[in-house]
């Protein structure tokens, strides 16, 4: 066996290479909540036990999800990267800047056109992801998507675009698709919330496997929905589906009035997330500093440590017991205003230690 893992399921045993250990733990935790004690991973609510050899994780220790800690060198810190030139090119770009997890668009985010990726591209991407240890992977839905609209044409386009992303996410073994809630000119509640839930259920029913639909919290400007933890919790309760998860954007949360500047307030925020949503549903963090002041409801990302959240805030986020076990994905402007760069990645690594 050497450095392989033994996965014992009620249906039998399977051997899995140790380089997918993190992906296994991450996926189980997002789907069901996972408790890791001694040399056993116990997935809560399901008859699944994962046993692994000691040298497969080099002696790293993990505690229960209610208070788990991951060693700093096991952090997953990554960024959004371009797929220009082919899907697998994004893996190389991630490695170049020091990232070990990744977010991509499947095609141009400001156009409805979709791109058909070949089987060879998909296989090359998956091979590079494993070889370069860049995982987990996420797809971000197009900026045009608005599942809250009453415009039939826009809604049809939005559903089709998300379904295409869910299909690709399944093919490349991505955790799921990160989707903005969208907007609606009237108050979001009652009948409209019910219709919104039906739309998401339709997308899930037409998608393959365990690919997750991941809502991203909004910054609160205009008529956007999904701005507060309470709203996120309500939609999670409405859908009550293990494939529904969340990506928390630090800039958006700060813009909505959730203070993230010190260890004390980050701890309070983490407790609120647990109360309203549950950390088992949080599958990614969009790590973005904020150009705007606390509660200004403006979605303006800044480079890490240069904005109003600051280095102290991100140090607190990276060391908080719940946050530290979730991948951090940069969407910062970068020093040259060309997107997430090595300087921002290096800053997060420095603050994580």
Image: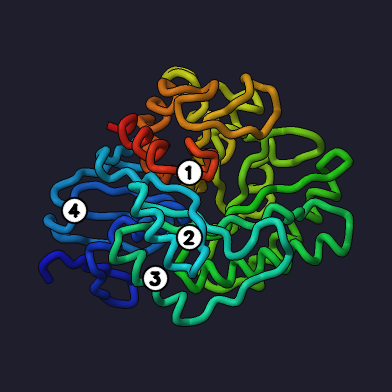
**Labelled pair 4, 2 in contact (Cβ < 8 Å):** no
**Residue 129 at what x, y percent from top left?**
36, 64
Circle 4 is placed at which residue position? Answer: 57
Residue at mark 3 to residue at mark 2: CA–CA distance: 13 Å
Query: Element at badge 2?
Result: loop
Q: Are marks 3 and 2 in contact (CB under 8 Å)?
A: no
- Looking at the image, is mark 4 or mark 3 earlier in the sequence? 4
**117 or 283: which is nearer to us?**
117
* Residue sticking out furthest to the front: 336
- Disc 4 to disc 1: CB gap under 8 Å: no
Between marks 4 and 3 in the image, the one whose residue lies nearer the viewer: 3
How far, Cα to Cα, is label 4 from label 1?
30 Å
Residue assigned mark 3: 126
Mark 3 vs mark 2: in front: 3
Rendered location of residue 115, percent (x, y):
62, 72
- What secondary structure is marked by label 3? helix
Q: Image height check: is 115 above or below 243? A: below
Is residue 150 something one can see in this rendering?
A: yes
The residue positioned 53% from the left and 60% from the top of the image is: 176
Which residue is found at the position 55% from the left and 45% from the top?
Answer: 247
Question: In terms of sequence position, does the residue under pointer 4 or pointer 2 come before the other?
Answer: 4
Q: Which of marks 4 and 1 is nearer the N terminus?
A: 4
SS at circle 4: loop
Q: In this view, does 322 lie to the left or right of 7?
A: right
C-beta proximity under 8 Å, tags 1 and 3: no
Q: Which numbered disc covers residue 340?
A: 1
The foreground one among 36 and 124 is: 124
Q: Looking at the image, which residue is at 76% across and 55% down?
A: 147
**Label 3: how many Cα within 10 Å (few below 14, some 14–19, many 20+):** many
- Who is closer to the viewer here, 52 or 96? 96
Which quadrant of the rendered structure holds the N terminus? bottom left
Along the line of sight, the residue nearer the viewer: 12 or 295: 295
């Amino acid at each position: 066996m050497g450095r392989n893992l033994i996965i014992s399921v009620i249906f039998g045993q399977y051997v899995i290479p140790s380089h997918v250990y993190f992906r296994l733990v991450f996926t189980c935790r997002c789907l069901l909540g996972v408790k890791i004690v001694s040399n056993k991973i116990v997935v809560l609510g399901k008859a699944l036990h994962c046993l692994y050899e000691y040298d497969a994780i080099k002696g790293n220790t993990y505690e229960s999800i209610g208070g788990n800690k991951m060693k700093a060198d096991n952090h997953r810190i990554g960024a959004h990267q371009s797929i220009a030139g082919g899907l697998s090119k994004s893996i190389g770009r991630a490695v170049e800047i020091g990232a070990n997890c990744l977010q991509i668009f499947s095609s141009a985010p400001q156009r409805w056109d979709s791109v058909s990726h070949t089987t060879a591209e998909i296989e090359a991407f998956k091979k590079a992801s494993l070889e370069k240890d860049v995982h987990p992977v996420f797809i971000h839905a197009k900026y045009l998507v608005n599942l809250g609209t009453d415009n039939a044409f826009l809604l049809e386009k939005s559903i089709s675009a998300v379904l295409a992303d869910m299909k690709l996410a399944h093919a490349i073994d991505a955790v799921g698709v990160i989707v903005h809630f969208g907007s609606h000119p009237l108050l979001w509640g009652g009948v409209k919330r019910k219709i919104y839930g039906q739309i998401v259920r339709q997308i899930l029913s037409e998608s393959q496997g365990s690919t997750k639909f991941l809502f991203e919290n909004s910054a609160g400007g205009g008529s956007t929905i999904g701005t507060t933890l309470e709203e996120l919790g309500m939609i999670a309760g409405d859908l009550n589906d293990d494939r529904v998860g969340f990506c928390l954007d630090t800039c958006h949360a700060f813009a909505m009035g959730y203070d993230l500047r010190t260890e004390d307030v980050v701890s309070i925020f983490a407790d609120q997330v647990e109360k309203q949503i549950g950390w088992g549903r949080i599958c990614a963090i969009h790590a973005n500093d904020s150009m705007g002041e606390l509660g200004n409801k403006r979605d303006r990302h800044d480079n890490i440590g240069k904005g109003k959240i600051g280095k102290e805030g991100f140090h607190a986020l990276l060391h908080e017991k719940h946050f530290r076990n979730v991948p951090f994905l940069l969407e910062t402007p970068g020093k040259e205003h060309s997107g997430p760069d090595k300087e921002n990645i290096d800053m997060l690594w420095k603050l994580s230690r």
